[in-house]
Image (cartoon, rainbow, N blue to C red):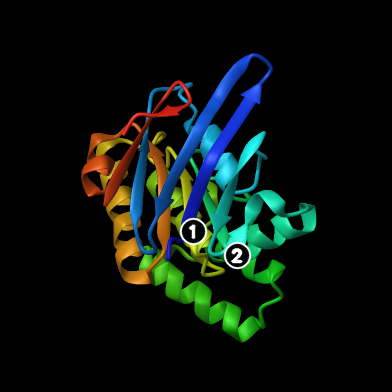
């Protein structure tokens, strides 16, 4: 059974056809690279898949849930329990430490403090930041901040990880390390990942590559 099914999705912004009849399936535990030039529709597609935007036509199914049929409460629940995001700009809360940032989704889910602490410590170890647990984002390098963002995205054990150009603000060596980390997480945690990227290294690491051009899949 597919973890993600996108069927006949269209999204228009006025006269601009951002997505045109997008259809594909993704199996569980798969790293998919979504490849296309700027303006090709990658971010729009990620937003539709994750419930941040609604298609004009078509359906999106994530782990058996019809995302396109959910109301706002249902979409919020989906993003708490099933789908997590990694953004190019990290999106960390400046006044919180690395550990506190990672723990935010668990606080929102009202996870018991002992369980929350165990999960945060496990994730810090997974991304290699145990020694930086108490540092704030401004005290961390760009690569370390992105690792915190990845750990935070994994905190609530999502089924689908969505990443929009996650290495776009990193140098080549740091970007490679982050991409390898994402690939390792997919392999070890069983997470399914959909990653928008221009990077040929991420394409090489991916289990599958989907190309999008002017809102059309060209694979």
What residue sits 44% from the left and 70% below the top?
123
Residue 141: in sight, yes or no? no
Locate the N terminus and report the quarter of the image it occupies: bottom left
What residue sits 51% from the left and 76% below the top?
119
Residue 114: in sight, yes or no? yes
> Residue at label 1?
160
Q: Vertical placement of 208 versus 41: above or below?
A: below
What is the x, y in percent for residue 182?
35, 55
Residue neighbourhood size for the residue with mark 2, other residues' Cα within 10 Å, grouped as few (<14), some (14–19), many (≥20): many
Q: Closest to the observer: 177 or 46?
A: 46
| Labels 2 and 1: the sequence-earlier one | 2
Residue neighbourhood size for the residue with mark 1, other residues' Cα within 10 Å, grouped as few (<14), some (14–19), many (≥20): many
Q: Closest to the observer: 112 or 3?
A: 3
Q: Which mark is residue 98?
A: none
Locate the C terminus and report the quarter of the image it occupies: top left
Q: Closest to the observer: 143 or 214?
A: 214
Residue 78 lies left or right of residue 190; in this view the side is right
């Amino acid at each position: 059974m597919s973890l993600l099914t996108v069927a006949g999705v269209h999204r228009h912004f006025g006269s601009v056809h951002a997505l045109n009849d997008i259809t594909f399936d993704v199996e569980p535990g798969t790293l998919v690279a979504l490849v296309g030039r700027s303006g090709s529709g990658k971010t729009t597609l990620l937003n539709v898949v994750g419930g941040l935007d609604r298609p004009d036509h078509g359906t999106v199914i994530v782990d058996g849930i019809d995302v396109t049929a959910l109301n706002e409460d249902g979409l919020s629940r989906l993003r708490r329990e099933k789908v997590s995001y990694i953004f190019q700009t990290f999106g960390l809360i400046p006044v919180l430490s690395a550990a506190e940032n990672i723990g935010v989704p668990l606080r929102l889910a009202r996870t018991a403090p002992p369980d929350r602490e165990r999960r945060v410590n496990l994730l810090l170890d997974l991304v290699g930041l145990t020694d930086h647990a108490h540092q704030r984002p401004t005290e961390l390098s760009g690569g370390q901040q992105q690792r915190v963002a990845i750990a935070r995205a994994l905190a609530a054990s999502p089924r689908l990880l969505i990443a929009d150009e996650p290495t776009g603000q990193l140098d080549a060596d740091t970007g490679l390390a982050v991409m390898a980390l994402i690939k390792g997480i997919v392999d070890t945690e069983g997470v399914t990942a959909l990653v928008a990227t221009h990077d040929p290294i991420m394409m090489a690491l991916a289990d599958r590559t989907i190309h999008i051009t002017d809102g059309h899949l060209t694979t």
